Image (cartoon, helix red, strand yellow):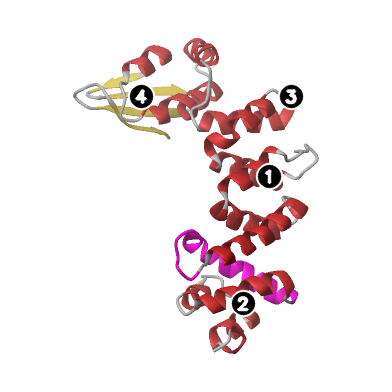
């Protein structure tokens, strides 16, 4: 049976699927030939067909690299199509958000190159910038040099890039000591947030002593736990018998 004759595909074209049940049901019925038909529709179909085909590949994203229904030729063709779409329209066209997800699963390095070469503008909406920097964070080490470059810019873009780096644990020793000194002196919540995201979270399972040294005396010392307060917000940390950090949260 061709894709166009499958009831589940016709339902997907004509109805809403807010919980992805139709797509998930259809995904289990697809053969290699159906996959190739979806690729063709993504390139040459009507707008509703393209949109539905794109949503199906998002549903199938975990299968893109290992499922036997995707031949090497099919993957290569799909990669060319989504890469071209992303290069032409990302990130201003909302539809390319899903296309970029597919590209990231098919070819993480190509997705990272798109982000690295992207001329980011502070005139973009907050929603677009949030999506772009989230994609950069998900690229991991591949985008660290680009994020470091952007973090030196003034204004919101520099701040977003700095946050993306720190959330991955990238902060220089001098910067960390400066932020620690600021917190010990003022108990500023912004300083504590930076320490928490860039230094404390990545140290889970490691010695807690360097964290305590950086933060100074806790507001409250409990048996195996420490509480630091800043502007009504608490940092709560626990340690095990070997003095290793076992839990940390802001509340």
Q: Nearer the viewer, mark 3 or mark 2?
A: 2
> Which one is earlier in the sequence, the residue at label 2 or at label 1?
2
Q: Nearer the viewer, mark 2 or mark 1?
A: 2
> Which one is earlier in the sequence, the residue at label 4 or at label 1?
1
Front in this rendered view, residue 72 or 177: 72
> Which one is earlier in the sequence, the residue at label 4 or at label 2?
2
- Is residue 55 located in the magenta-colored stretch of the structure? yes
Counting from the top left corner in percent of width and height, residue 214 is at 42, 14
Q: Nearer the viewer, mark 3 or mark 4?
A: 3
Circles 1 and 3: CB atoms closer than 8 Å:
no
Q: Which residue is mark 2?
A: 37
Circles 3 and 4: CB atoms closer than 8 Å:
no
How far apart, in angstroms, are the residues tagged by discs 2 and 1? Answer: 27 Å
The answer to whether residue 224 is above or below residue 67 is above
Residue 227, disc: 4
The extreme right residue here reads: 123
> Which one is earlier in the sequence, the residue at label 3 or at label 4?
3
Check the picture and name the quadrant holding the N terminus: bottom right
The answer to whether residue 41 is above or below residue 171 is below
Q: Nearer the viewer, mark 4 or mark 2?
A: 2
Q: Which residue is mark 1?
A: 114
């Amino acid at each position: 049976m061709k894709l166009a004759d499958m009831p589940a595909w016709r339902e997907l074209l004509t109805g809403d699927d807010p919980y992805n049940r139709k797509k998930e049901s259809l995904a289990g019925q697809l053969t290699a030939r159906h996959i190739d038909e979806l690729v063709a529709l993504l390139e040459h179909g009507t707008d509703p067909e393209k949109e539905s085909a794109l949503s199906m590949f998002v549903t199938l994203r975990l299968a893109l690299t290992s499922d036997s229904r995707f031949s090497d030729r099919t993957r290569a063709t799909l990669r060319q199509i989504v890469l071209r779409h992303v290069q032409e329209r990302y990130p201003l066209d909302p539809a390319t958000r899903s296309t970029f997800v597919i590209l990231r699963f098919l070819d993480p390095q190509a997705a990272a190159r798109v982000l690295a070469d992207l001329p980011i503008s502070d005139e973009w909406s907050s929603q677009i910038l949030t999506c772009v920097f989230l994609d950069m964070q998900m690229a991991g080490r591949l985008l660290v040099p680009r994020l470091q470059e952007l973090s030196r810019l003034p204004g919101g873009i520099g701040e977003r890039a700095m946050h993306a780096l720190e959330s991955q644990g990238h902060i220089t020793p001098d910067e960390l000591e400066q932020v620690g000194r600021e917190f010990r002196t003022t108990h500023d919540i912004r300083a504590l947030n930076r320490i928490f995201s860039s230094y404390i979270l990545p140290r889970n399972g490691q010695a807690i002593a360097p964290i305590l040294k950086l933060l100074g005396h806790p507001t409250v010392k409990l048996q195996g736990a420490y509480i630091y307060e800043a502007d009504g917000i608490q940092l709560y940390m626990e340690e095990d018998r070997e003095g290793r950090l076992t839990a940390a949260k802001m509340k």
